[in-house]
Image: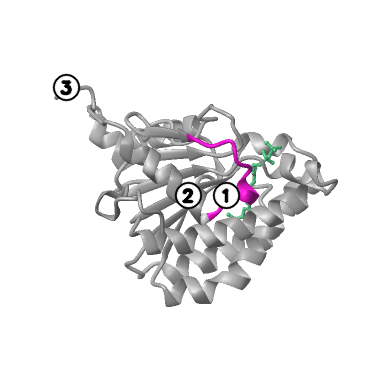
Amino acid sequence: MREDLDLTRVPQHVAIIMDGNGRWAKQRGMLRVQGHRAGLETLREVVRHSQRLGVKYLTVYAFSTENWKRPQDEVSGIFKLVVKYVQSELAELCANNVHVSVLGDWDALGVPEESKESLRKLIGTTKENTGLHFNIALNYGGRAEIVNAVNKILAEGLDKIDEQTLSDHMYTAGMPDPDVIIRTSGENRLSNFLTWQSAYSEIVLTPVFWPEFTNDEYEKCIVEFQKRDRRFGGHK
Ligand code: FPP
């Protein structure tokens, strides 16, 4: 581990926009879906390293509501990787006490049935686990999440709400907001990720493409977070 990393001040909730798989593949004359495959290897390692670091919540952006605009073979390639991930990782996730949630409209029409089945199994098998909370945002959009929360509130017949009410109806109900949002590949947008929850999150950007995001890069991002002075609107 890096010497400049303070293990007593590791963020409780880390959220990641895993960007740059396509460009990484293109640079190598490979297909985009091969980039996503390489990205999945990175994800495996990041889940493992989050546990070593003592991160309590890890949320990754796997597929946005906008990603449907991509070519059909790329979309189906990503959903096949979901199946592959569950096949290869479920035993280890269970052995490590990882609790997996899926944020977003993952049960929607259009999501392949085999992917839904894998996700149901992943959620069901890990639901009693009490270790790392690993959230996969899939068919997720931040604005859609807010609209969904408001509709749930209306259906409950509430006529007066506050911020807590909204938080309690988000996919992340009961979880702390992300302390830090990391985005790889040099882009500096939030792209409809955790729109409600990111109000006070630190944003850490790295130029590295997601398939090249090593544990050391991950630690560098946390060190960068630790250098920031979080005031939540107040002052010292
Ligand atoms: C962004 O790179 C990456 C994605 C849209 C997909 C990421 C998905 C995975 C790593 C696999 C998901 C599977 C599980 C189980 C979570 P990009 O394609 O936007 O890259 P580019 O900006 O270079 O084109």
Q: Please tell me how crowded label 2 is: few (under 14), some (14-19), or many (20+) other residues with Cα within 10 Å.
A: some
Q: What amino acid does circle 3 point to?
A: His
Q: Which residue is mark 1?
A: 213
Main secondary structure of the magenta stretch: loop
**Left or right: 28, with 208 as reference point:** right
Q: Is residue 157 visible?
A: no
- At x 57%, y 49%, the residue is 213
Q: Secondary structure at mark 1?
A: loop
Q: Quadrant of residue 187?
A: top right
- At x 35%, y 34%, the residue is 201
- At x 35%, y 55%, the residue is 55
Residue placed most toward the observer, 92 or 72: 92
Q: Which residue is mark 2?
A: 218
Instruction: Point out the stretch of residues depicted in magenta.
Output: 205-214
As measured in the structure, the alpha-carbon distance from the residue carrying label 2 to the one carrying label 1 is 7 Å
Q: What amino acid does circle 1 point to?
A: Phe
Q: Which residue is mark 3?
A: 235
